[in-house]
């Protein structure tokens, strides 16, 4: 067997190291397709670009940008772009690989890709942010396109940034190409339901999982880590279903209310202030978040949050991974041994990419659906995918994560095998 040398050497519990160990776990279930397994451990293409811009004060600043296409066997690349001061090539590689698995798990005709710029967007003016976005888009323009690789919003990026990306790509190619990105503003070919899609997917898979393990959502105690687009929407939907959101943690701190937080007030407050100092809650130390008496945990922040130590302390019965890669492999084993059910990121948060797919399809046909139709289609796809994965888990007596990888990797490697190697 060849070594797993790649662009970067993975370290234990790093995002790429976590992904590789997840692939290793699925090997026994791949049968004859295992001969193609190295495909999963090597990104197809990684582009590192310099992003120079003129700042408002006249100085020239350089930022490092990435676009990684992990696998394109099932279709064009699909995956977000994040703007964050700690973005690395290794992180983007892992996120692109999880996108490959995620798209295959819900059976979308995409491969996996991801992008990022190492920048703190809060320190840029609106004009500087636009320049960074447009220059980055021009630099990666050689490998993106509606039939090649379709970016989308991720950490610290939004519909406005997608509009700039779409416009830049369109200007460079000489015709309006709405399908080059998803997560756009509605009047530029965006889809209804896209903004809430990831959080909705977390809720839909969580509702199904709760039903299967006999956990009544009425009065269930929920804790949410990360209160952006995903965490806040999932929290609202669980509250609507009768659950109590008792704790929320974000970059500003951790808040708690035994009787349940008032989300109607908290969501708008958090958007402008973060959750800290919210009137109607008590402030907790960040580490206390992992000791709370809860039924459902929704990690919807960044990767690597559920460590072995935290997994041992966690009191939840159900973990719904709104974020990508929030649980390290060692913690996965601990949670499984303690009987805590984890609905893994690669199915749990696939609502976003599913509605991105709907947006892409609508852009090609210039025919748009209403929000009810989108939500119905999303729910149907998510529930069907989860049921298939659950059946696989039951059949092989494996965790939902390993079962998701088994279902997805079989689809990816079947496509690889049927396409063959060229030349």
Image: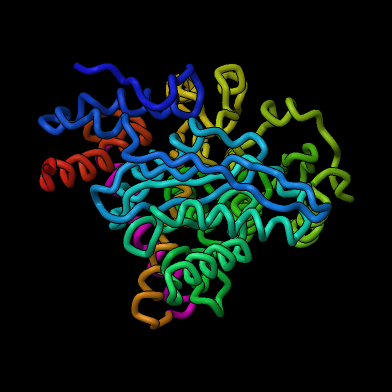
Give left or right: position of 359 versus 285: left
Please identify the quadrant where the N terminus is shown: top left
Question: Residue 400: percent from the left, percent from the top?
Answer: 36, 36
Query: On the rendered structure, is 380 left or right of 265?
Result: left
Q: Visible in this render: residue 119?
A: yes
Quarter of image, res 2: top left
Q: Is residue 386 magenta?
A: yes
* Identity of the residue drawn at 63% across and 65% down: 160
How many numbered dots are placed on residues in this image?
A: 0
Q: In this rendering, is residue 172 above or below 75?
A: below
* Residue beneath the point at 86% across and 49% down: 278
Q: Nearer the viewer, residue 413 or 128?
A: 128
Q: Position of residue 198 (x, y in %)?
A: 52, 55
Q: Main secondary structure of the magenta part?
A: helix
Compared with 288, 110 (above or below) is below
Question: Which quadrant is home to the C terminus?
Answer: top left
Q: Residue lying furthest bottom in this view?
A: 367
Q: Residue at x 83, y 52 (%)?
A: 57
Work out whether residue 131 or residue 414 is closer to the camera in this orientation and state it. 131
Residue 111 x %, y % = 32, 49
The image's colouring method is: rainbow
Figure quadrant of residue 351: bottom left
Examine the rendered structure and indicate whether residue 270 appears above or below residue 306. Answer: below
The region drawn magenta spans 369-392
Query: Taking the image as drawn, is residue 321 in sight?
Result: no
User: 255 left or right of 23?
Assistant: right
């Amino acid at each position: 067997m060849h070594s797993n040398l790649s662009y970067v050497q993975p370290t234990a519990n790093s995002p790429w190291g976590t992904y590789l160990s997840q692939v290793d776990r699925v090997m026994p279930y791949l049968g004859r397709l295992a001969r193609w397994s190295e495909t999963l451990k090597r990104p197809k293409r990684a582009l590192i670009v310099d992003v120079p811009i003129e700042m408002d004060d006249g100085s020239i600043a350089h930022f490092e940008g990435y676009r990684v296409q992990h696998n394109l066997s099932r279709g064009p690349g699909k995956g977000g772009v994040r703007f964050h001061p700690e973005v690395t090539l290794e992180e983007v590689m892992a996120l692109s690989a999880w996108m490959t698995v995620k798209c295959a798990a819900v059976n979308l005709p995409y491969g996996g890709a991801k992008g990022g710029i190492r920048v703190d967007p809060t320190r840029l003016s609106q004009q500087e942010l636009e320049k960074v976005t447009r220059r980055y888009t021009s630099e990666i323009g050689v490998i993106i396109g509606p039939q090649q690789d379709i970016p989308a919003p991720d950490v610290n990026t939004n519909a406005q940034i997608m509009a700039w990306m779409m416009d830049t790509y369109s200007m460079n190619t000489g015709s309006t190409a709405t399908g080059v990105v998803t997560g756009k503003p509605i009047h530029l070919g965006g889809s209804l339901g896209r903004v809430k899609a990831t959080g909705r997917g977390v809720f839909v898979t969580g509702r199904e999982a709760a039903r299967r393990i006999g956990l009544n959502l009425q009065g269930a105690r929920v804790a949410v880590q990360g209160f952006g687009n995903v965490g806040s929407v999932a929290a609202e939907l669980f509250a609507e279903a009768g659950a109590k959101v008792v704790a929320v943690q974000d970059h500003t701190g951790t808040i708690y209310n035994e009787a349940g937080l008032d989300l109607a007030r908290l969501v708008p407050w958090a958007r402008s202030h973060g959750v800290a100092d919210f009137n109607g809650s008590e402030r907790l130390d960040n580490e206390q978040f992992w000791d709370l008496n809860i039924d459902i945990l929704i990690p919807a922040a960044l990767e690597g949050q559920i460590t072995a130590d935290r997994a041992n302390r966690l009191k939840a019965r159900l973990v719904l991974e709104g974020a990508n890669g929030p649980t390290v492999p060692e913690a996965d084993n601990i949670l499984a041994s303690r009987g805590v059910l984890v609905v893994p990121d690669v199915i749990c948060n696939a609502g976003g990419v599913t509605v991105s797919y709907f947006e892409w399809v609508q852009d090609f046909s210039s025919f748009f659906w209403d929000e009810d139709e989108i939500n119905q289609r999303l729910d149907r796809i998510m529930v069907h995918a989860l049921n298939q994965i659950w059946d696989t888990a039951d059949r092989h007596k494996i965790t939902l994560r390993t079962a998701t990888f088994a279902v997805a990797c079989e689809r990816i490697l079947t496509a690889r095998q049927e396409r063959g190697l060229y030349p």
